[in-house]
Amino acid sequence: MSAHPEAAGQHAHAAHHDDHHDEGAHGSLKGYLIGFGLSVVLTAIPFWLVMGEVLESSVATALLIMGFAVVQIVVHMFFFLHMNSQSEEGWNMLALIFTLVVVGITIAGSLWVMYHLNANMMPQMLHDMRSVP
Amino acid sequence: MSMHTPQPAEGPASFYVLEEEHAHPGSGTMLGFWIYLMSDCLIFAVLFATYGVLGRNYAAGPSPADLFDLGLVAINTSMLLFSSITYGFAMLAMVKGRKGATLTWLGITGLFGAAFLGLELYEFHHLIHVGATPQRSAFLSAFFTLVGTHGLHVFFGCVWLVTLMLQVAKHGLIAENRRRLMCLSLFWHFLDVIWIGVFSYVYLIGVLP
C-alpha cells in the first residue's frame, strides 16, 4: 500500500478497515511483476530442456525439472500467495508445513513401497518373476 | 535501569491488555480458507502418488511420448500463468477501490481461465479420439484423474469468478466482496501451483526417454 502514494488518500477514507494487513495480504505491483518474471523463466527453462533435448541423461533432466518446479512453487507461494511466517500469527505457515509433511509421506511413501514390492516377495517367486521375459 | 522504575502513582500497574486488539475482518475466513486449500493439496498429493505409481504401466498402449503435445502444454501453462498475474492486478485494483479496473482484470482472468479449459478439453478430446481413453491403461486412468481433477477445479474457479464479477458489479467493492475476492485469489494462485507439479511431473518428465 505504501508503495502507491497516489492511492493513499483515496484509500484512507474508502477502506480503513484493512489498514493493518494490506501489504502482506495483497502484495504490490512490483511483487507481482517480479513473481511473474521469475515464473516465466522457471517455466521456460524446463520446457526448453525437454523440447530442445539439451541433456543426454534423462535422469539429470528429470532432476533439473523437479528442482525448477520446487523453486517455482516457492516463488508462487511467496509472491502470489503472500506466504510468510507472520500471516495469521503463523497459523498459515504451520498449516502449510503440516501439509507438506503429510504430502511428503504420502508421495515418497507410496513410491517407496510400490517400487520395492520385489523385496517383499518370496525368493522362489522372485526367481520366477526374473525368468519372465 | 528504567525497568526498575516503579509505576507512576496515578494508577495500579496493569499486566493485562486493556483494549482488545482490533479484529481483522475476514481474518478467520482467510485462515479457514487456507486450511481448506491445504486439504485440497492432500487430494492432489494422493492423485500425484497414484500417478507416480501407475504412470509407467502402459498395458502395451500408448506412452506419454506418443500422446503429449508439449507445444500445446506450453501454451496451456502460459494461459494459467497469465491468468495468475491478471488476477494479481485485479487484487491491486480492488485495494485501490477501483471497481471498473477490478472488473476488467477479473474478466481478463476469466478469459485466460476459459482458454486454459478449452485447450485442455481439446487435448482430452484428441486423446479419446485416438483411442487413449481412461480405460485403456493404468497410466491413462491416473492421468485423466489427476489432470481432470485439476481442470474441474479451474472450471469451478471460473464459475466462482463470474459469480463474484456479478456481485461486484451489483454491490460494489464492499467488505464482503473484498473478502470473497481474497479467497478466490488464494484459490486461483493455488491452482497455478498445482499446475506446476502437473506440467513438470506428468508432461515434461513423462515424455523423457
Image: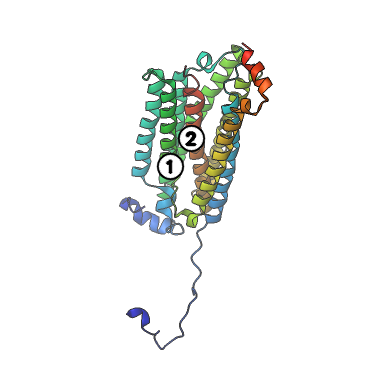
Report the front residue among B149 and A61.
A61
Q: Which residue is drawn at 54% across and 41% down?
A: B166
Circle 2: residue type: Asp
Residue B203 position, x and y percent, is: 49, 23
Q: Which quadrant, please, contains the C terminus of chain A?
A: top right
**Number of other residues with Cα within 10 Å of mark 2, as a class: few under 14, some 14 to 19, many 20 or more:** many
Q: In which quarter of the image is residue B155?
A: top right
**Which residue in the rendered view is the most extreme toward the bottom?**
B9
- Check disc 1 and report its element: helix, strand or loop: loop
* Marks 1 and 2, how far apart at CA: 10 Å
In-image side of A90 versus A27 (left or right): right
Q: Residue at x 44, y 42 (%)?
A: A77
Taking the spot 50% from the left edge, 59% from the top edge, the residue there is B24
- For residue A80, the mark is 1
Chain of the residue displaying label 1: A
Judging by the rendered image, the residue that carries numbered circle 2 is B192
Q: Residues within 10 Å of mark 1 (few under 14, many from 20)?
A: many
Contact flag, marks 1 and 2 (Cβ < 8 Å): yes
Q: Position of residue B172 (x, y in %)?
A: 50, 48
Residue B87 in which image quadrant: top left
Tell me if A20 is positioned left or right of B165 in this view. Answer: left
